[in-house]
């Protein structure tokens, strides 16, 4: 009787173990889109660019949430494609390179969540990096980014010069405090030699906030959406930011044995902290926080199903918008409301207008003249994502803020 009970318990335990260990089913890899990298070698050889980074460690999130779909692609596969495009875009220069992953290493293993090196740190080569990237298998397990950062701190301790830590992750299901502590510890170890770049796969709002904080912990570098890096020009701009720097051209004119040195004075016409030659969004309103391109990005406001109440997590961003509007009396704003497709079109049209008016009312409570803010409702007509899933519908229940400069 005891043997039968023991066998039954063993079978049940094994079944639970299998259910807990088996991740999502593997998704067949999609063929990557054609990519023609921007050739940075001529600018480097001509002295228009110069190398600033001597070493880098790329960290790839291979946890379970990276098996999710985003814009028709598995997030892990999109991240691997971005890493490949970065590898193709890097110019010929001496580098120490490394590639690490984190997540569950094996389905049937006691190592439930950990990190592992796939390449380096070693003298960088495109073929070597590509071979390391090819070793990454499917997504599964938890998201111990802190473990990967701590490992990078140890692995990079013998390298010289500036270091770029480049993280590709959706930043979902993470221990944010542990991750930030690991990033700050690495910054404390390497000081001004370290910059942190965080590339968000997907569009999870909480993940975006965490990645921004991780990049800020580095004191230099920044967080950016993967969508901005897929095009050859976007990837080239990122490679320049993370690995290179532009060289100021100094013109020397000799007149009657007198040498005149003219150094161009950088201009920042709109005062946003981004010089005009790099500013892709001139005439930014005074006091607006901008991204590395010099563009003021107004966050969207998302709503619960059939609700118009603004959730607390969006109030801080709206306070910033109100401050910008109050500091720039000539600037106006349009707020468009949107819904998912649950309910009748007529009801959803009214709901979208009420959502836009809720945001307008909040801005008015912060001193913004209501006459400067117009609202429009689109109902369910302008979805940002699919209405076939709960996640997609959540992304459609939103209000979009647009400055009218």
Image (spheres, helix red, strand yellow):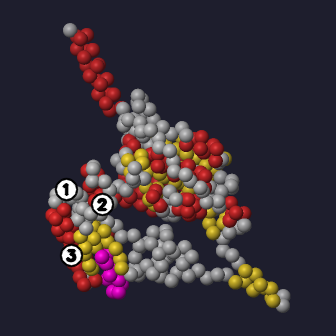
Element marked by disc 2: loop
Q: Which residue is mark 3?
A: 361
* Left or right of 348 on screen, residue 137: right
Instruction: Determine the residue located farthest toward the right in the rendered image.
Output: 257
Pointer 2 local density, CA inside 10 Å: few below 14, some 14–19, many at least 20: some
* Left or right of 169 on screen, residue 253: right
Instruction: Tell me, for residue 342, which label it has, or none.
Output: 1
* Left or right of 30 on screen, residue 252: right
Element marked by disc 1: loop
Pointer 3 local density, CA inside 10 Å: few below 14, some 14–19, many at least 20: some
Instruction: Tell me, for residue 125, which label it has, or none.
Output: none
Q: Are marks 1 and 2 in contact (CB under 8 Å)?
A: no
Sequence order check: which comes first, mark 2 or mark 3?
3
Sequence order check: which comes first, mark 1 or mark 2?
1
Pointer 1 local density, CA inside 10 Å: few below 14, some 14–19, many at least 20: few
Q: CA distance from mark 1 to mark 3?
A: 25 Å
Q: CA distance from mark 2 to mark 3?
A: 24 Å
From the top left corner, tell me how far across and down residue 250 is, in percent.
71, 78
Q: Which residue is mark 2?
A: 383
Element marked by disc 3: helix
Sequence order check: which comes first, mark 1 or mark 3?
1
User: Residue at 24% across / 58% down in the picture?
Assistant: 340
Give the number of the mark in front: 2 or 3. Answer: 2
Task: For residue 63, say whether it is visible.
Answer: yes
Q: Are marks 2 and 3 in contact (CB under 8 Å)?
A: no
Rendering quarter of residue 18: top left
User: Residue at 41% across / 36% down in the picture?
Assistant: 26
User: Residue at 50% across / 57% down in the picture?
Assistant: 230
């Amino acid at each position: 009787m005891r043997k039968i009970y023991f066998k039954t318990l063993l079978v049940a335990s094994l079944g639970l173990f299998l259910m807990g260990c088996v991740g999502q089913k593997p998704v067949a890899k999609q063929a990557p889109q054609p990519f023609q990298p921007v050739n940075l070698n001529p600018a480097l050889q001509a002295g228009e660019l110069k190398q600033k980074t001597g070493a880098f460690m790329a960290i790839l999130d291979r946890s379970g949430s990276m098996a999710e779909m985003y814009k028709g692609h598995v997030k892990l596969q999109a991240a691997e494609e971005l890493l490949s495009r970065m590898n193709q875009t890097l110019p010929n220069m001496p580098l120490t390179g490394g590639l690490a992953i984190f997540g569950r290493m094996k389905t049937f293993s006691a190592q439930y969540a950990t990190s592992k090196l796939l390449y380096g740190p070693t003298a960088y080569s495109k073929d070597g990096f590509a071979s390391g990237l090819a070793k990454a298998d499917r997504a599964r397990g938890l998201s111990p980014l802190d473990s990967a950062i701590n490992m990078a701190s140890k692995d990079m301790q013998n390298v010289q010069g500036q270091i770029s830590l480049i993280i590709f992750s959706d930043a979902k299901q993470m221990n944010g405090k542990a991750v930030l502590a690991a990033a700050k510890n690495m910054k404390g170890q390497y000081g001004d030699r370290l910059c942190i770049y965080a590339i968000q796969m997907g569009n999870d709002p909480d993940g975006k906030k965490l990645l921004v904080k991780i990049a800020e912990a580095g004191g230099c570098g920044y967080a950016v959406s993967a969508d901005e890096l897929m095009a050859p020009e976007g990837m080239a701009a990122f490679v320049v930011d993370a690995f290179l720097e532009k060289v100021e051209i100094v013109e020397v004119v000799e007149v009657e044995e007198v040498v005149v040195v003219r150094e161009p004075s950088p201009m920042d016409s709109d005062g946003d902290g981004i010089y005009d030659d790099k500013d892709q969004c001139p005439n930014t309103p005074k006091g607006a926080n901008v991204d590395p391109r010099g563009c003021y990005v107004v966050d969207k406001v998302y709503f619960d199903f059939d609700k118009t109440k603004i959730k607390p997590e969006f109030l801080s961003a709206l306070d910033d918008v109100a401050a910008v509007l109050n500091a720039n009396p000539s600037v106006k704003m349009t707020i468009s409301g949107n819904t998912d497709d649950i309910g009748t079109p007529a009801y959803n049209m009214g709901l979208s207008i009420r959502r836009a008016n809720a945001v307008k009312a909040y801005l008015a409570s912060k001193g913004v003249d209501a006459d400067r803010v117009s609202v429009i409702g689109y109902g369910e007509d302008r979805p940002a994502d699919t209405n076939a899933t709960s996640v997609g519908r959540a992304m459609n229940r939103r209000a979009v803020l647009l400055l009218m400069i």
